Amino acid sequence: MFLRYLVALPLILTSYVGVPFVYLTLSSQLFRRSLPGGTSRSFTTGFTETFTDHIGGFWPVPVALVLFAALWWMTTAWPRIALLPSAPLALTGLFSGTVEKTLLAVAAPAAAWGLAWLAAQIVSWPLTRDVRRSAAEVVVGLRGEGRLRVQSRRLLLDKLPPPLHKGSPVGRVAIRFDRIKHVEAGAVRTAAQWRLANTSELTITPGPVLRIIGGGQEWLLPVDDAEAAARLVLERAEVRGKAEPRPPMDSRRWTSAKHLWELQDAPVLRPNPQKVKHGAHHMMLVLSALTTAMAGFAAFRMFTGDWTFVFGVLIFGGVALGTVLSWGSIGATQKLTEENPRSPLDEDPDPHRTPVTGWSPRPVSASRSLF
C-alpha cells in the first residue's frame, strides 16, 4: 500500500495545488495579453511568481491538504476535496466574458477532479491482498442504483433510491465490521425488490448477488463479481473489525434512530421521490477552518501590540469552537442512525432462510458465517 500511496501522492498534489496555480498563471497570462501592448512571460516564470504571491493568502489550498491528511483513507472524498481550491477560481472565470477564460474555468475543476479520482483508483484497485487488508476505502458498484463502500471500519451503502417513507432521517445504511455475522455470495434467477432498513428499496436484477447479515440488518446487493466482493468484505472484517461501544439507550443521540425504528412497520401512503441529502454539516467544518484562521490572525495582531484584536480572538475563536462541536455532534448522530437503522435489541435475520424467490447460494468457498 505504501507504493500505491507513493504513486498517488503526486497526483493529489497536482490536483490540489498545481491545478489552481496553473489556472491563476494562465489567467494572468491571458489578462496581460489583453492589455494594449501587453506581453506574456514564460509559463515557468509566471507560475513561480503566481505561487509566491498567492500561496499565503489562498486559503483553500492548505484547507484541502489538511482535509486530505484527515481523510487519507476515504478515497471517495478526494475528488470532492479537489474542487475546494479549483471551483471558486473557475466560478470567477465563467463571468469573465472571454471564450479562453471560460474554457479555462471549465477545464480547471474537471482536471482537478479527474486527477484526484485517478489517485483514488490507484490506491483502491485492483483488489490485491494488501488492498483487502488495508484501511483504504474501496467502492463496489451495484447493478442499478446504489453503491457499496468498503471503508476502514464499516460497510456503507449510499446513492440509494429515495426512502419509501419521506420521514426517514437517513438515506444511507451501514454495518460495522465487528457486527457482521454472515457474508455469502449467491445469485437470483428472477427480479425482486429488497427493502433496506432505512426503507429504501433496491431492485435485484437476475445475476450474482452479495448477501450480508449483521447489526440487525440483511442486505442483498446486486454485484457483478459477488465472490470477489465477499472475499473483500470477509478479509477486511477479519483484519479491521474493531468494537465500538454504543451510547446509553436514553442518550439524545438515539433520537433519529428511534424515529427510524418506528417507520419500519408504518404503511407507505404514497411514493417518496426525494432523496435524503447528506454532507451539509461538513460546511460547518469549512466554516470552522476559516474562523480559526481569522482567530489566529487576530491573535498575531494582539501579541504584536494592538490589544483591540482580543475581541476578534474571542469572537472568531468562539465561532470556530461552536461550529466544530456542532459538526461533530451532527456527524456522530447521523453515523449512529446509519449503523443502527434497526434496534440493537432485534435479532439478526436467519442466514439459513431463503431471502427471495429464485435465490441460490454460490459455492461454500465464497461464503462464511461469522457467528
Image: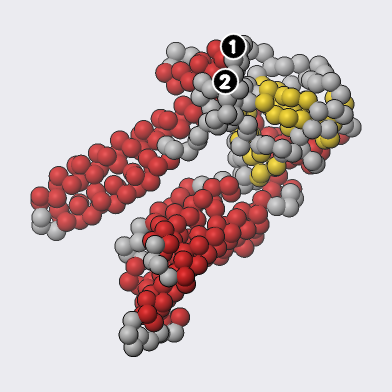
Secondary element under disc 2, as helix, strand or loop, is: loop
Name the residue rendered at 84%, 35% in the picture. 207
Q: Quadrant of the C terminus?
A: top right
Check residue 266 in the rendering and tell me which mark sits there, or answer none.
1
Asked whether 1 or 173 is in front, the reply is 173
Q: Quadrant of the N terminus?
A: bottom right
On the picture, is 159 further left or further right than 84?
right
Look at mark 2 in the image and give the residue it sits on.
165
Q: Is residue 15 visible?
A: no
Based on the displayed image, in which of its 4 quarters is residue 330 positioned? top left
Few, some or many residues within 10 Å of mark 1 (<14, 14–19, 20+): few
| Residue type highlighted by circle 1 | Ala
On the picture, is 23 further left or further right than 137?
left
Asked whether 299 or 79 is in front, the reply is 79
Name the residue rendered at 66%, 44% in the picture. 139
Indicate the position of residue 108 as horizontal and vertical percent values: 50, 64
Name the residue rendered at 60%, 22% in the picture. 271
Q: Residue furthest right?
A: 363
Indicate the position of residue 159 as horizontal and vertical percent values: 61, 37
In the depicted structure, whether residue 187 falls above or below residue 55: above
The image's colouring method is secondary structure
Based on the displayed image, in which of its 4 quarters is residue 348 positioned? top right
In the depicted structure, whether residue 296 falls above or below residue 277: below
Indicate the position of residue 15 as horizontal and vertical percent values: 52, 62
The CA distance from mark 2 to mark 1 is 8 Å
Based on the displayed image, in which of its 4 quarters is residue 85 positioned? bottom left
Q: Is residue 360 visible?
A: yes
Marks 2 & 1, CB-CB < 8 Å contact: yes
Name the residue rendered at 42%, 18% in the picture. 252
| Residue type highlighted by circle 2 | His
Asked whether 150 or 167 is in front, the reply is 167
